[in-house]
Image (cartoon, rainbow, N blue to C red):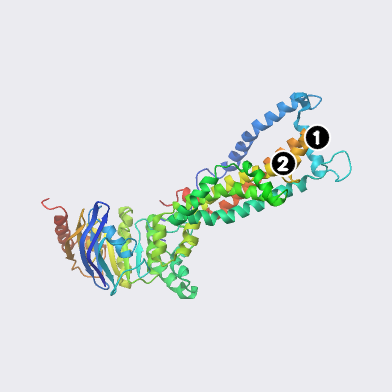
């Protein structure tokens, strides 16, 4: 053991026995308001199960519609949506995944380069900053004209939406790398590429994850918008289609589905960040210093 | 071994260093002592190759210095460890970046971690270590490159007094074993006399070398030296140089 006040890992805070109890309490208080709203909504719907002259079905009606949509028999029948839920989810999630990965693969190296090199910044950054204020929804006609009513039109829009927050955050992350980390790598004989890969990229990773979380939200927006207009499948298509035929129960079940998927994918990124950025969590707990 | 000749450094209108001439021999331990803002860290950064002098030149092992490199390994004041790497991975970062085979540095790494008292902490992250232990990692990371000179920029300046004493003793022991050429920047008079063969006292703005004092105290040294008459005499001399008339 070293002589000078050694300590290994510090995650003290709450006594252990209190942690589950506190978590349960926090969970209960988080659910209280949504449950209250749902109960009031259900009650207001009364016997007929609809509000506002039939425009707004009650939560139980929505729940039943979702069950039929998810688990009903596919094919002939009065309910065109029966059994198609998983397919719609896979179409939309698949597009988001493709667009997201494409954007991250482009935006991370580009952002690191812009943050690292003044030359790259002068060359590329102004173009990005000029294009960025154009909302992705405004790109929709362009996307249809270029890529047609095909999958790639949606993927292009999603990728564009994910690209901006990731590139901007990666740039910022690469700019804020501690100077002495770079100097340390230099004096240890590392070349430029090695420093980018082994110092700048890991140092920028927390910022990149911030960008990816924002980007993912934009990606879900983009997939719904493009499926409503340009592509004939997925949750966005069902959303618009169900509205046209007056199936508001399906519309609401669809909205809820999108919300849950957005939440789950965000959690997945957080989980990955927790794994990769363990060093940062430890530093935040004030170990040492 | 190290030869500053007529080195001047300006940052815009501010003159940080003015005509520095300084020679350091092989295996010599030289302390640069001065008040904050006297340019002593700048002098070290120039030798490391992090910055270029405005005028003059710096020779190292018979050639002009170039880019930063492992022949002039640096120990930073804040350790500057990569926080996402374990102690082991921080120490082996240089050899790994150079593409050395693990067999080529594994034994040396283990030996150095033992020398600086870090065995058993190989898998810890920097944030799990105390300030003193982080500096030990910084020292091991520099020494694993087998540098011709070790440049230390106030490495113990941010540590508490007890830890600083322990680290000074550790450095004396390590130096006794390795005998690397050292340029050690500090504002602590005791530290400079205790560690160095020569203390170069600097003045502030523009930075100049005011006195170059050989420290003729026997080695191997230990903290016991701090209270001996020979040590105190050097201290009186240097305090007089830094604060004349007081």
Q: Within the image, what quadrant is residue A53 found in?
A: top right
Nearer to the camera, A255 or B245: A255
Nearer to the camera, A81 or B31: A81
Residue B55 locus on image (x, y percent) = 24, 62
Instruction: Determine the secondary structure under disc 1.
Output: loop
* Depicted A133 relative to depicted A206: above or below: above
Residue A186: image tag: none
Q: Which residue is mark 2?
A: A228
> Which residue corresponds to the image point at 86% horizontal and 45% vertical from the top-left?
A73
Report whether A180 appears left or right of A225.
left
Residue A198 locus on image (x, y percent) = 49, 61
Q: Which residue is mark 1?
A: A245
Q: Visible in this render: residue A151?
A: yes
Q: Specify few, some or many for label 1: CA neighbours under 10 Å numbering under 14, 14-19, or 20 or more.
A: few
Sooner in the amino-acid sequence: mark 1 or mark 2? 2
Q: How many marks?
A: 2
**Chain ID for label 2?**
A
């Amino acid at each position: 053991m070293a002589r000078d006040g050694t300590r290994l890992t510090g995650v003290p805070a709450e006594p252990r026995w209190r942690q589950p109890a506190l978590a349960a309490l926090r969970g209960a208080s988080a659910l209280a308001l949504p449950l209250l709203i749902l109960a009031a909504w259900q009650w207001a719907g009364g016997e007929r199960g609809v509000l506002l002259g039939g425009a707004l079905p009650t939560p139980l009606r929505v729940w039943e519609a979702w069950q039929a949509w998810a688990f009903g028999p596919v094919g002939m029948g009065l309910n065109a949506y029966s059994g198609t839920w998983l397919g719609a989810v896979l179409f939309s999630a698949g597009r988001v995944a493709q667009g997201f990965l494409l954007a991250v693969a482009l935006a991370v190296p580009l952002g690191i380069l812009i943050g690292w090199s003044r030359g790259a910044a002068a060359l590329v950054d102004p173009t990005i900053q000029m294009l960025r204020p154009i909302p992705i929804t405004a790109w929709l006609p362009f996307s249809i004209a270029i890529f047609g009513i095909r999958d790639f039109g949606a993927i292009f829009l999603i990728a564009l939406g994910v690209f901006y927050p990731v590139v901007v955050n990666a740039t910022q992350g690469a700019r804020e790398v501690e100077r002495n980390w770079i100097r340390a790598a230099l004096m240890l004989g590392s070349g430029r590429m090695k420093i980018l890969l082994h110092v700048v990229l890991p140092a920028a990773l927390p910022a990149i994850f911030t960008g990816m979380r924002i980007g993912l939200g934009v990606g879900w927006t983009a997939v719904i918008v493009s499926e409503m207009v340009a592509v004939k499948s997925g949750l966005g298509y069902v959303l618009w289609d169900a509205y046209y035929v007056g199936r508001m129960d399906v519309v609401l079940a669809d909205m809820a589905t999108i919300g849950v998927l957005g939440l789950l994918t965000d959690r997945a990124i957080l989980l990955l960040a927790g794994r990769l950025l363990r060093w940062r969590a430890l530093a935040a707990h004030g170990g040492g210093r | 071994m190290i030869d500053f000749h007529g080195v001047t450094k300006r940052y815009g209108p501010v003159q940080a260093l003015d005509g520095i001439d300084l020679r350091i021999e092989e295996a010599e331990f030289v302390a640069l002592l001065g008040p904050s803002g006297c340019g002593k860290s700048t002098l070290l950064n120039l030798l490391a190759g992090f910055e270029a002098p405005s005028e003059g030149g710096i020779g190292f092992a018979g050639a002009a210095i170039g880019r930063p490199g492992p022949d002039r390994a640096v120990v930073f004041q804040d350790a500057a460890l990569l926080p996402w790497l374990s102690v082991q991975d921080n120490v082996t970062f240089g050899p790994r970046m150079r593409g050395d085979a693990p067999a080529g540095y594994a034994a040396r790494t283990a030996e150095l971690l033992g020398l600086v008292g870090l065995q058993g902490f190989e898998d810890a992250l920097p944030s799990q270590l105390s300030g003193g232990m982080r500096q030990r990692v910084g020292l091991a990371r520099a020494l694993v490159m087998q540098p011709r000179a070790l440049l230390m920029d106030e490495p113990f300046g941010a540590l508490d007094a007890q830890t600083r004493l322990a680290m000074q003793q550790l450095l004396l022991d390590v130096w006794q074993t390795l005998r690397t050429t050292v340029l050690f920047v500090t504002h602590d008079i005791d530290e400079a006399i205790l560690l160095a063969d020569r203390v170069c006292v600097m003045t502030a703005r523009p930075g100049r070398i005011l006195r170059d004092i050989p420290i003729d105290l026997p080695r191997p040294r230990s903290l016991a030296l701090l209270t001996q008459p020979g040590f105190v005499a050097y201290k009186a001399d240097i305090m007089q140089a830094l604060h004349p008339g007081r």
